[in-house]
Amino acid sequence: MEVDEKATALYSFDPYLFGLFLLAFYIIPYPIYRIIAHRFKWETNPKTMSRHWSDLFDGISYGLLLFIFGNYSNTLSWTTVATFYPSLFGYALIAELPFTRTSLPDIKNWPKGMWFVFLTALAIILVFAGYHIYLGFLLPMPFVIYYVSCLAIPAIILASSFLLSKEVNQNWCRTKIYSWKSRNKNKNATQQAVGEETTLLPVAASGEGAHNPYSRQIAIHLHHWQIFYVLAFFTRFDDPVSQVGAGIVLACYMEGICAYGYDRLVNDG
């Protein structure tokens, strides 16, 4: 029963293990990666000391959420740590291939090599996902329902980001409301004119549109660190395969942070 309670815990926290978690997956790999990347001229964003400092505290904040809701106080193991470091630099080497030096927003222009890497990674993720859902089924109900339903959280965040982009870039809500009011106004005017048996002459457009309060457009850029950060919440089982999966997704997440930092999903255009 005790094992089931730990395995099905929706959240957990241990201060000592959280310190080890930060040490193993952020404090130690971050400077090592930056030094090696500089030595071998890997692609990285130049960072000032203030940016390093900001990334550190972003890392603590994001890491705290991940540790609590990813059940790492019950599943953190040396298997995850041992998988993390080879995966971190393995991912970096793959990212340095000539055909992988692109980004998700440029998907229409991806070369064949990038598509091969992407589809291979997607297949691996789906296999791991299927196995993790199977592990969820082995636990008492309704854990697996909660587990799968949590996928809705990142989906809602992503969808809301695109809706925000549509609203800001197209002034969507006010334009729709303005069009609806204009149609109703013209319809009422037409009905009134017909009722009075008068001739309705074409009315020149006023040239006025819906008020636009937005001075700048925004752009959506989904980064690989965000994808793998989300996946790291689901590798929450005390199972060797899950712990290996945790090491891989944490490594891919941290590669993005070490190389580029906490770039945002929603950006000013």
Image: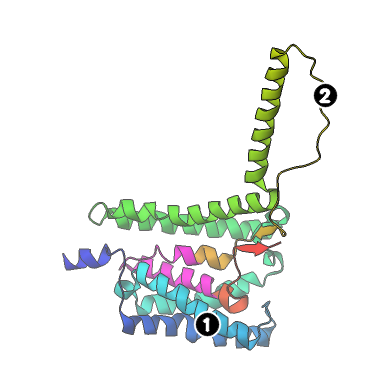
In the picture provided, is 68 more to the left or to the right than 178? left
Above/below status of 38 relative to 10: below
Q: Where is residue 16, by image quadrant? A: bottom left
Q: Nearer the viewer, residue 47 or 139?
A: 47
- The boundaries of the magenta stretch are 229-254
Q: Nearer the viewer, mark 2 or mark 1?
A: 2
Q: Nearer the viewer, residue 165 or 231?
A: 165
Disc 2 residue crowd, few under 14, some 14–19, many 20+, Cα 10 Å = few
Does residue 249 belong to the magenta stretch? yes
Whether residue 72 appears in this view of the structure is: yes
Q: Position of residue 113 (x, y in %)?
A: 67, 60
Amino acid type at image mark 2: Pro
Q: Where is residue 9, by image quadrant? A: bottom left
Q: Which residue is mark 1?
A: 56
Which residue is at a point 40% across and 54% down the rendered structure image?
Answer: 130
Which residue is at a point 38% across and 52% down the rendered structure image?
Answer: 149
